[in-house]
Amino acid sequence: MAIALLLSVFPAFSQQEPLLEKDYVAYLFTYFTGNHISEEAVCYAVSMDGYSYWTLNGGKPVIDSKVISSTGGVRDPHILRSQDGKTFYMVVTDMVSDNGWDSNRAMVLLKSDDLVNWKHSIINMQKRYPGQEKLKRVWAPQTVFDPEAGKYMVYWSMKYGDGADVIYYAYANDDFTDLEGEPKPLFIPENKKSCIDGDIVYKDGIYHLFYKTEGHGNGIKVATTRSLTSGKWEEEPDYKQQTTDAVEGAGTFKLINQDKYILMYDVYTKGRYQFTETTDLKNFKVIDSEVKMNFHPRHGTILPITRDELIRITDKWGKPAELGAVPNNPVLPGFHADPEVLYSQKTKKYYIYSTTDGQPGWGGWYFTVFSSDDLKNWKYEGVMLDLKSDQVPWANGNAWAPCIEEKLIKGEYKYFFYYSGNPIKEGGKQIGVAVADSPTGPFTDLGYPIITESPVGRGQQIDVDVFTDPVSGKSYLYWGNGYMAGAELNKDMVSIKKKTLTVMTPEGGTLQDYAFREAPYVFYRNGLYYFMWSVDDTGSPNYHVAYGTSKSPLGPIEVAKDPIALIQNPEKEIYGPAHNSVLQIPGTDEWYIVYHRINKNYLKDSPGTHREVCIDRMEFNEDGTIKRVVPTR
């Protein structure tokens, strides 16, 4: 399917907690462009690989300097993601260089939750603090989180009279609208000479302060400490820039999912930027031949961003043609598996429920839910069932593979949430059910499991699916690990009609095609009941989806001639795509498959517990067979 179509349907998610590095897909470069007031403004550029950058908004500013500053111009933008993962802080020099290099007394603090809309506060040092009559300039502020203080530290250089430029600091208030307390020196070199353009990078328990020596070499040096406000810095003697030209504005960032860092700086006398690469923040090599830009930046910083954030800013300011395809998947942040998708007739929204992944031994103990109005933006709705709480009295963990059904009962919508859990008393995994009046809860558990024993005497009671037959209106429950079982539900939706219990495991096949393992899923289309299931082990790259059809909700199942519906694509680094649910867009014949895959960075390190949720288009041939799904990144 065309990338453009996928992007129009699934472009974004919303973060609910601090992000994982694997959730970043691109880089945002914030910079300014020159020494004229028209060039002293915040601009954006984006990159998919950290080496090739393409400007947004046609190279024009994305924030109006006249609105946010006292001078009409801003320089040296530094951007930071907050500890919560979803708030952004930017600080800039409030300055117009045409007024003179000793003309400015202020900085601007900006805050955003979407990278598009920014609230701002101007901090004029002479107005904010007494005794600042000799202050000449306030330059290049940056922000770093100080865990010892539990606050965000703003640090910048100031010069008084004929003295040296010194890097000072103060903590921002909780709203990031002002500074708390008096500014204090953060770093003064042993030689007591000027230092500006501080840039702090934290690595392996050590803070590395990159700074420019001003007026005595004009290069970039590094000082390190284990405590930001201790005053104990170790200065490294060598310059870090890899050029004999004068440089300033060091900016350092880590490449996504790599053990490499980029140190970049403004070669301001030559009107160009230089990129260098390092693994230890000590030794640097020039990589200019690998870097591309369609603009000329001045002193800026680079921030890794998520797919959601990338699409948000390119929706706002246009996607550069050079950027290429934006990733379609994953659609949720963090690690999630066994996704169940629901369209609610009550709320007219879509919902995804899943196993919370990333825990050793598949030890997740709670379920979360995400909602969407349009399948474009996913909102975290919170934990809706916690198996270690009083909410589920019979279980204590292993919250696995949920499913949900919306039923109109006596004119009111009810939501029946089925899942497997680890019983407190004894025995293997069992299936429970919780009920709510809303897709997001609160859910009330039945108080006991409804499926406790295997109908074949082996295998776990897991991977439950619920299906309401549009022909008869009856609802059915399916489950199994090593076998597939199905049974009609009673009208109460919390118990099965035992006489209808049917073992309907598809027979035959191998791990290369359709040998049944787990994760049954059922849907109806054009007179056929489609049965999907997962093959192989969830930690295997070969984990994939097979299918068959039936004329009845309880089988027998006829395995498709070409039974594989979805399988790995190593060339795209897509592994283990399976354990799926299916979504039909209401009132259409447009279908999507929602599944998990192994995060590529964990392929050799606990792959079965590092899975992520994806969505792709599912299409049918004229004879009703499923076209093999093309998984996308």
Image (cartoon, rainbow, N blue to C red):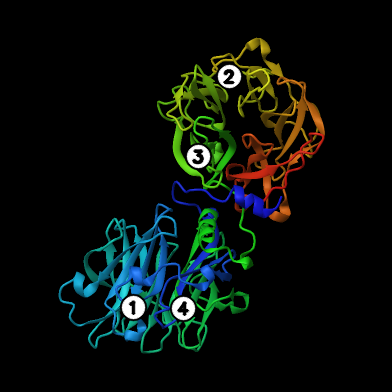
Q: Nearer the viewer, mark 1 or mark 2?
A: 1
Compared with 447, 338 (above or below) is: below
- Badge 1 or badge 4: first in the primary sequence: 4
Type of amino acid at the residue the image marks with label 4 = Thr
Q: Nearer the viewer, mark 2 or mark 3?
A: 3
Q: Is residue 574 left or right of residue 315?
A: right
Q: Is residue 329 visible?
A: no
Q: CA distance from mark 1 to mark 2?
A: 69 Å
Q: Quadrant of residue 407?
A: top right
Rate crowding at label 3 as few (under 14), some (14 to 19) or many (20 or more) other CA atoms within 10 Å. many
Total labels drawn = 4
Residue 95: mark in rendering:
1
Residue 371: mark in rendering:
3
User: For the residue labelled by badge 2, is the local secondary structure a helix, a strand or a loop?
Assistant: loop
- Badge 4 or badge 2: first in the primary sequence: 4
Task: Indicate the position of residue 72 as horizontal and vertical percent values.
Answer: 34, 75
Rate crowding at label 1 as few (under 14), some (14 to 19) or many (20 or more) other CA atoms within 10 Å. many
Residue 33: mark in rendering:
4
Type of amino acid at the residue the image marks with label 1 = Met
The structure residue drawn at horizontal position 48% and vertical position 48%, both measured from the top left corner, is: 14
Q: Nearer the viewer, mark 4 or mark 2?
A: 4
Residue 451: mark in rendering:
2
- Badge 1 or badge 2: first in the primary sequence: 1
Q: Is residue 552 left or right of residue 410?
A: right
The structure residue drawn at horizontal position 56% and vertical position 23%, both measured from the top left corner, is: 431
Q: Is residue 120 left or right of residue 462?
A: left
Q: CA distance from mark 2 to mark 3?
A: 28 Å
The structure residue drawn at horizontal position 58% and vertical position 40%, both measured from the top left corner, is: 337
User: For the residue labelled by badge 4, is the local secondary structure a helix, a strand or a loop?
Assistant: loop
